[in-house]
Image (cartoon, rainbow, N blue to C red):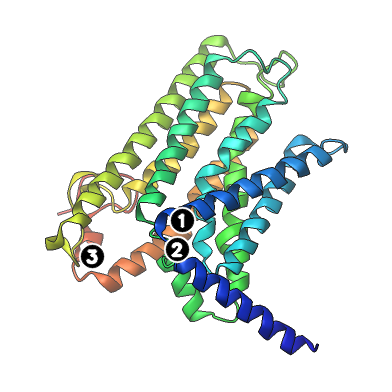
Amino acid sequence: MNSQLSFKLHDSKSRNVSAWARSLSKSMALSLILGIYLLTLVFSWLEITILLKTSLNPIIILLITDITATLIIYLFSTLLDNASVYDPYWSVIPIPIMVFYWTFNPQWSNFTLQQVLTFILVLLWGFRLTSNWVSYWSGFDFEDWRYRDFRAKNPKLFWLINLVGIQLVPTVIVFAGSLSLWPIFANPLDKSAGFTPTSSLLLITAIIGAIIMLGAISFEFFADRQMHRFLANPNNKGKTISDGLWRYSRHPNYFGEVSFWWGMYIFGLSSNFHYWWTIIGPIMMTLLFLFISIPMMEKHNLARRDDYWEYQRKTSKIVPWFPRK
């Protein structure tokens, strides 16, 4: 069998699978997504078990496993012809990352207050984002508009855009952001660390970090709730929301998301200032939203809403501030 015929047969099978997936009800489609992620979790656990027998650093082991898991999700998204299969990964993966780091703590059975708070806050963040995705994802007939645009403009290169831009790059950024969890769960401050701050400074840092994380989750929640209420009103079709939190920021949900990662970084510092370098995570997260997510959303809104340019002129891009006159 020549390679061209083999490719055509593979493409035909893929189309049949994607057509079958699109015919599923939402509940069945979500069950399939759950099955894919559970299968990925089992495979990742087996991979970690093998890699732990090597001399690799635990953080490197986790990075390798994280990338492998993303490749598995990518294969399923290709088979099902829907890049949105990856979407829940962003909000799900920090939870197993927490568990992995926790297993390296020599006192893993004794939870500190900081660890308990981190578990609760990350779970709240992940649950909110994931449930938000579940609410608007109708099934395999739905794919994020950004992915559809990429597919339409670059049909031959979409496989690469999907692999690198849509999946691997966000995986690496979330991994970098989650590095702040390492000092919290696996390596709290010891006397041999390069800089040992006072206990009062650690406490102040922890309080600031926790307040930012909780505030960011709340900010995202109310921003999304206000947007959902606005979109549910048929009279608002084609219009731009400009009240509530959206009066002070064009992207309050993105502001909340970026703030969450900065809060987690600060919270991590309260465990061990020696890990100040994990700031690379929130920096990467900030750059992602400022130079990729927000510009794409702005261009999309300008093309769809006649009143957006005026809203854009008056309203702060991301950091909440009073509207311009």
Residue type at mark 2: give it. Answer: Leu
Q: Residue at x 28, y 49 (%)?
A: 249
Structural crowding at the residue carrying mark 2, measured as other residues with C-alpha within 10 Å and reported as few (<14), some (14–19) or many (≥20): some
Q: Do the residues labelled 2 and 3 touch (CB within 8 Å)?
A: no
Which numbered disc, 3 or 1, marks the residue closer to the eye? 1
Instruction: Identify whether 301 is placed above or below 41.
Output: below
Q: Identify the residue position indicated by label 3 in the image.
A: 308
Q: Residue furthest left?
A: 235
Marks 3 and 1, Cα distance to the nearest angstrom? 37 Å
Whether residue 274 appears in this view of the structure is no
Q: Do the residues labelled 2 and 1 touch (CB within 8 Å)?
A: yes
In the rendered image, residue 309, in percent from the top left (x then y), is placed at: 23, 67
Q: Identify the residue position indicated by label 1 in the image.
A: 28
Q: Residue at x 51, y 10 (%)?
A: 200
Numbered disc 3: secondary structure: helix
In the rendered image, residue 298, in percent from the top left (x then y), is placed at: 34, 64
Q: Is residue 58 left or right of residue 322?
A: right
Q: Identify the residue position indicated by label 2 in the image.
A: 24
Q: Nearer the viewer, residue 270 or 112?
A: 112
Instruction: Identify whether 229 is placed above or below 184.
Output: below
In the rendered image, residue 265, in percent from the top left (x then y), is placed at: 54, 33
Structural crowding at the residue carrying mark 1, measured as other residues with C-alpha within 10 Å and reported as few (<14), some (14–19) or many (≥20): few
Residue type at mark 1: give it. Answer: Met
